[in-house]
Image (tube, rainbow, N blue to C red):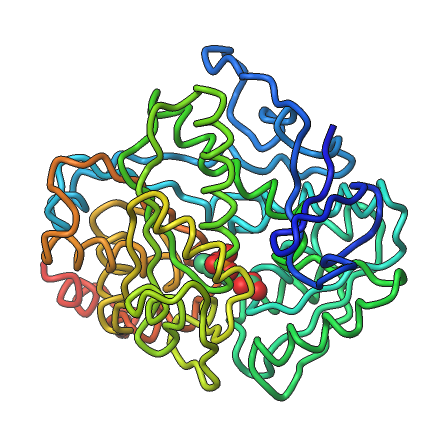
């Protein structure tokens, strides 16, 4: 049986109360289980979020067949990075094109079970796209707050076409999140940002699938970090599996941010146990243009407890990694996703990562989310006359 536990005061609450934070101390809540069964990973059923339903807190009331994303062995990229054994979990292959679907199938199922009429989130884009799609499928009204002018085109188009009410806030993501948390303070509107403990339960399945597909836990996971929900969720799942004896060691949890939005990296480097917010985050990787990660404290714990690390990369390094993913492996990832690969390369160069480690890089979102950026960083198409000689010349014949 699942229940909620406060990460601040350790208070315990019924999982069927529509709580966003602890009613006693306002800290984040976490889903806990009385007892989890050990799972038999040799069971041949295909990978998916709901393959792990015995380790999830709700029944699948709404699904778009999320999870089961490819785990590619990336030899060309491994060579570029300087590793022997690199895998890329392509979360951009989820139904709406990002890892957020794992959380939304669980979070929106919880909303249906609670019978809430409306769901809401603030978003740098992917959360809103996923929530709008799952809201549509569930028949629930969706409301999203986006930082005006700072969300990639593909993501805005998804939120709109799936029928969410889209509000563009003249501020950044952190402003939008602060506002939506206030808007959701009554029972009328259910908040689906990563403060929502049920959403994070779904997201832990990216770690489950990776372990199951590799046949063991990797030595290291590398995540791009924005609000720090995904890395915290994966770590929670891995701890649960460690406690059950399903894995023998915790993989090193590694978080990558960009130089323009690096509050978690700063906190990690300074030895702080919580994040000091950055007021003016800026990066080409708009998905992780976040200055005040709500799950920062948890992510720091995950990184330190697992012997991992956090580091920042430049936007140029991010774009270079995005192009290498695309050109060496055929993996189309949006900039934020590629930051994980850029960070990994830097860690190998610095000797922080051993060359014989088995590493899983999580490519969180699809290239098609941000087509404008991809065009901008690529050579322009060669335009020719509609005539054989000109075309032959253009293709170098
Ligand atoms: C592609 O959609 O925060 O550290 O509002 O879209 O769990 O926040 C997106 C985040 C990484 C960071 N990669 O994950 C949102 C949002 C991509 C993302 C992240 C995001 P978290």
Q: Where is residue 34 in the image (x, y as percent from the top left)?
A: 68, 27
Image mark count:
0
Viewer-closest of 248 and 202 = 248
Furthest-bottom residue in view? 170
Residue 269: which quarter of the image?
A: bottom left
Q: Position of residue 131 (x, y in %)?
A: 68, 55
| 207 to 10, vertically: above or below | above
Q: Which residue is drawn at 26% across and 34% down?
A: 73
- Side (left or right) of 315 relative to 283: left
Q: Residue at x 22, y 53 (%)?
A: 344
- Side (left or right) of 75 relative to 19: left
- Side (left or right) of 126 relative to 358: right
Q: In this view of the protein, can residue 96 be seen by the observer?
A: yes
Q: Residue at x 23, y 34 (%)?
A: 358
Residue 265: which quarter of the image?
A: bottom left
| 106 to 186, vertically: above or below | above
Q: Position of residue 146 (x, y in %)?
A: 63, 75
Where's the N terminus, which quadrant? top right
Q: In this view of the protein, can residue 368 be seen by the observer?
A: no
Q: Where is residue 149 in the image (x, y as percent from the top left)?
A: 55, 83
| 393 to 349, vertically: above or below | below
Where's the C terminus, which quadrant? bottom left
Viewer-closest of 367 and 255 = 255
| 207 to 361, vertically: above or below | above
Q: Which residue is drawn at 45% across and 86% down?
A: 280
- Side (left or right) of 23 relative to 157: right
Viewer-closest of 332 and 274 = 274
């Amino acid at each position: 049986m699942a229940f909620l536990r406060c990460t601040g005061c350790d208070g315990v609450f019924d999982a069927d109360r529509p709580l966003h934070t602890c009613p006693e101390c306002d800290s984040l809540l976490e889903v806990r289980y009385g007892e989890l069964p050990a799972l038999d990973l040799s069971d041949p059923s295909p990978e998916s979020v709901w393959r792990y339903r015995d380790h999830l807190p709700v029944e699948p009331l709404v699904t778009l067949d999320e999870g089961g994303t490819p785990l590619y062995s990336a030899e060309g990229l491994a060579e570029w990075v300087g590793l022997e054994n690199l895998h890329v979990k392509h979360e951009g292959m989820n139904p709406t094109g990002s890892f957020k679907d794992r959380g939304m199938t669980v979070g929106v199922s919880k909303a249906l079970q609670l019978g809430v009429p409306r769901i809401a989130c603030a978003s740098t884009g992917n959360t809103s796209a996923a929530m709008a799609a799952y809201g549509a499928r569930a028949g629930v009204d969706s409301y999203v707050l986006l930082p005006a002018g700072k969300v990639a085109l593909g993501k805005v188009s998804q939120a709109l076409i799936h029928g969410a009410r889209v509000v563009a806030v003249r501020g950044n993501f952190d402003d939008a999140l602060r506002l939506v948390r206030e808007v959701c303070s009554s029972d009328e509107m259910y908040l689906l940002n990563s403060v929502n403990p049920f959403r994070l339960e779904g997201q832990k399945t990216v770690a489950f699938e990776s372990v199951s597909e590799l046949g063991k836990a990797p030595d290291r996971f590398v995540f791009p970090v924005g609000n720090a929900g995904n890395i915290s969720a994966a770590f929670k799942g891995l701890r649960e599996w460690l406690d059950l004896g399903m894995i023998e060691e915790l993989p090193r949890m590694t978080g990558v941010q960009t130089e323009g939005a690096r509050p978690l990296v700063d906190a990690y480097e300074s030895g702080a146990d919580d994040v000091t917010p950055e007021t003016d985050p800026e990066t080409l990787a708009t998905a992780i243009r976040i200055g005040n990660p709500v799950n920062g404290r948890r992510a720091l714990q995950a990184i330190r407890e697992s012997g991992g690390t956090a580091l920042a990369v430049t936007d140029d390094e991010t774009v270079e990694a995005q192009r290498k993913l695309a050109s060496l492996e055929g993996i189309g990832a949006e900039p934020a996703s590629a930051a994980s690969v850029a960070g990994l390369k830097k860690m190998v160069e610095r000797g922080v990562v051993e060359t014989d480690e088995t590493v899983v890089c999580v490519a969180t979102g699809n290239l098609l989310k941000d087509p404008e950026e991809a065009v901008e960083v690529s050579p322009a198409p060669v335009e020719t006359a509609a005539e054989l000689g000109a075309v032959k010349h253009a293709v170098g014949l």
